[in-house]
Image (spheres, helix red, strand yellow):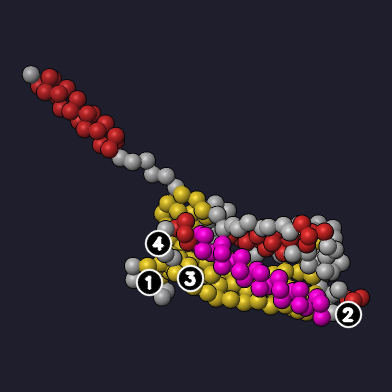
Amino acid sequence: MPGANSKTILFVFLIAVVMIGCGKRAIIRQYYVIDFPVLSDSTQLAQPPLSDKICEVLPVRVSPAYAEKQIALRTDSHELKYYVYHFWAVKPENAFANLIENYLQSKRLFTLISSQLWKTHPDYEISTRIYHLEAVKVNKHLNAHLHLDIELTDTRNHQTVVVHSFDKYAPLPKRKVNLFAAVISQMLHRELDVFSQKIRAYLLSLPKMEK
């Protein structure tokens, strides 16, 4: 009976499809944040800011290869790949700008540090350029690589008064993207601390009326 055989084959096929479907694991995208706690020192917050001037955090410029949410993996000197299921939760330009603003504001360097000055002309501007933000494959290990420039400019004479540049690698103890995000966050935290110290030294060197 050809009809019965066809029904049997169709039934077996449907059962096979269901079994294959049940055996597959759901593919879940993983999202990671560049972040670190900005601790507020109550004693420091009670002190007046070092300068009565206003500082604007300009939009962070990111090299096109690293500007989107895809996390980059360097596998050779001129070869980049992107993780298929691992992404930044926030675009690097926004994540870095928020951290720069919040961290430097906590240091009480200026009366106001903000990335959203609509009608106020700032006395200073902070500009940042990210050249590399990537995991780097070295044999069977991974390194975190962060390379950027960050500058403070006096808008009154358009002179760059503080510059901090770094291009650093840090090994990951395990090949985990979460560790990569954590190490990048730690690297940024340390370098922002150095940058804030340079700004403090510059402001302290100015005559009182110019701060």
Q: Is residue 122 visible?
A: no
Q: Amino acid at mark 1?
A: Val
- Which circle, 2 or 1, is nearer the viewer? 2
The amino acid pointed to by label 2 is Pro
**Residue contact between numbered discs 3 and 2, judged by CB atoms under 8 Å:** no
Numbered disc 2: secondary structure: loop
* Cα–Cα gap, marks 1 and 3: 12 Å
User: Foreground: 162 or 6?
Assistant: 162
Q: Say which residue label 3 marks.
A: 170
Q: Secondary structure at mark 4?
A: loop
Label 1 element class: strand
Give the alpha-carbon distance from disc 2 to disc 4, as whole Å: 50 Å
Which residue does the numbered mark 1 point to in the structure image?
138
Check the picture and name the quadrant holding the C terminus: bottom right
Q: Residue type at mark 3?
A: Ala
Span highlighted in magenta in the image: 181-205
